[in-house]
Amino acid sequence: MAIRNIVPDTDEVMHKVCRPVAKIDDKIITLLDDMVETLKKAEGVGLAAPQVGVLRRIFVINTMEEPEEFIEFINPEIIETSGTQEGSEGCLSIQGFEGFVVRPMKVKVKALNRFGEEFIFEGEELMARACCHESDHLDGKTIRDTCEYEVFREDD
């Protein structure tokens, strides 16, 4: 396992739509392992493959449970949303930036795990926000594209 560099939102890879994973092979398993290690080091909630320079429909989420638990999503699809939450949100690819966003309060996501098994994840509040945020990355969108306005910028 390796810690990968997190690419900034200005990198062109962050603005491209990711391709689905056709086959879960050793390369994809290594990517998943590396993404978990990278997310641990960054102390974030979620990380999408384009944030480490890979245009594949993959993201990982830290559930913030004790001990830390990570869920890996391959070819995720948000199949249901309900409710609304709003507030500030940051991104590992834009250090020091927070934007005001409106997200669903609950989401249901269908995806594959590393063994190719389909699962349904139901997330509320922070987990719903994280799934939506990471899904946006897979579609070439960053927090700057989805936020209504900037809340805070550390370097101002």
Image (tube, rainbow, N blue to C red):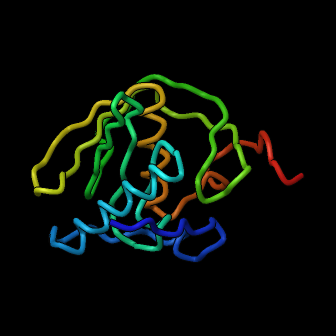
Residue in view at x 36 percent, y 28 percent: 66
- Locate the N terminus by quadrant: bottom left
Toward the viewer: 124 or 40? 40
Kindly indicate the quadrant of the structure image that contains residue 110: top left
Kindly indicate the quadrant of the structure image that contains residue 88: top right
Q: How many marks?
A: 0
Residue in view at x 45 percent, y 49 percent: 40
The residue lying furthest to the top in this view is 83
**How far across and how far down the image is residue 38, in percent?**
45, 58
Q: Is residue 97 left or right of residue 49?
A: right
Residue in view at x 22 percent, y 65 percent: 29
The residue lying furthest to the right in this view is 156
Q: Is residue 117 left or right of residue 88?
A: left
| Residue 46 position (above or below residue 4) | above
Residue in view at x 57 percent, y 69 percent: 7
Toward the viewer: 67 or 61? 67
| Residue 97 position (above or below residue 33) | above
**How far across and how far down the image is residue 135, in percent?**
42, 52
Q: Is residue 23 left or right of residue 13?
A: left
**How far across and how far down the image is residue 71, in percent?**
29, 44
